[in-house]
Image (cartoon, rainbow, N blue to C red):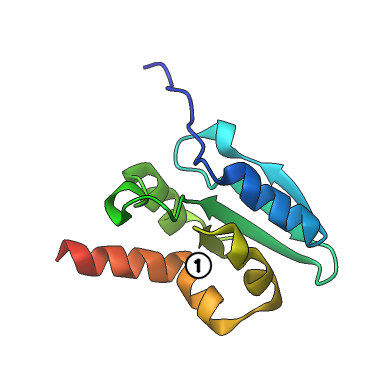
Amino acid sequence: MPRRAARVDTNHGQIVQWFEHCGCVVQSLAALGDGVADLLVFHRSTRRLLIVECKDGSRKPSERRLTPDQVAWHTAWLGAPVYVVERAEDVPGLLSGVPAVLERCESGRVLERMKGRAE
């Protein structure tokens, strides 16, 4: 079955720019599709590797949910944590470890909230 083209959220480029402005090296993985997270981010000053899923926080919650493929990939991924970033302004807080931002962006918590809605 042919693979459909991967879509990127409208704020993808803005999130990338914020990470780069904060001293990160960013590689977009969005073209891979199949539920793979959107960005591979290396924060030079802390030497941390982040895996980031971009979602457009200006859209309705139902329109920014993880797709079934994304849920499967996030659940199966055993490497670095996956963070879901809905607002570019959250990037500095994510990088500096602001607890409220970490909680809002941590994929496992996003998956738990989604599971709670489905029940």
Classify mark 1: helix, strand or loop: helix
| Quadrant that contains the C terminus | bottom left
Q: Residue at horizontal 42%, vertical 53%?
A: 58
Residue extending farthest top: 2
Is any atom of residue 36 visible in this view? yes
Instruction: Please provide percent x and percent y for residue 32.
Output: 56, 33
Mark 1: give few (<14), some (14-19) or many (20+) Cα within 10 Å.
many
Q: Residue at horizontal 65%, vertical 79%?
A: 97
Instruction: Please provide percent x and percent y for residue 17.
Output: 72, 49
Left or right: residue 118 compared with residue 4: left
Instruction: Please provide percent x and percent y for residue 59.
Output: 37, 50
| Residue on which disc 1 sits | 105
| Residue 34 versus residue 55 in the image, above or below | above
* Residue type at numbered disc 1: Cys
Residue extending farthest bottom: 99
Quarter of the image holding residue 41?
bottom right
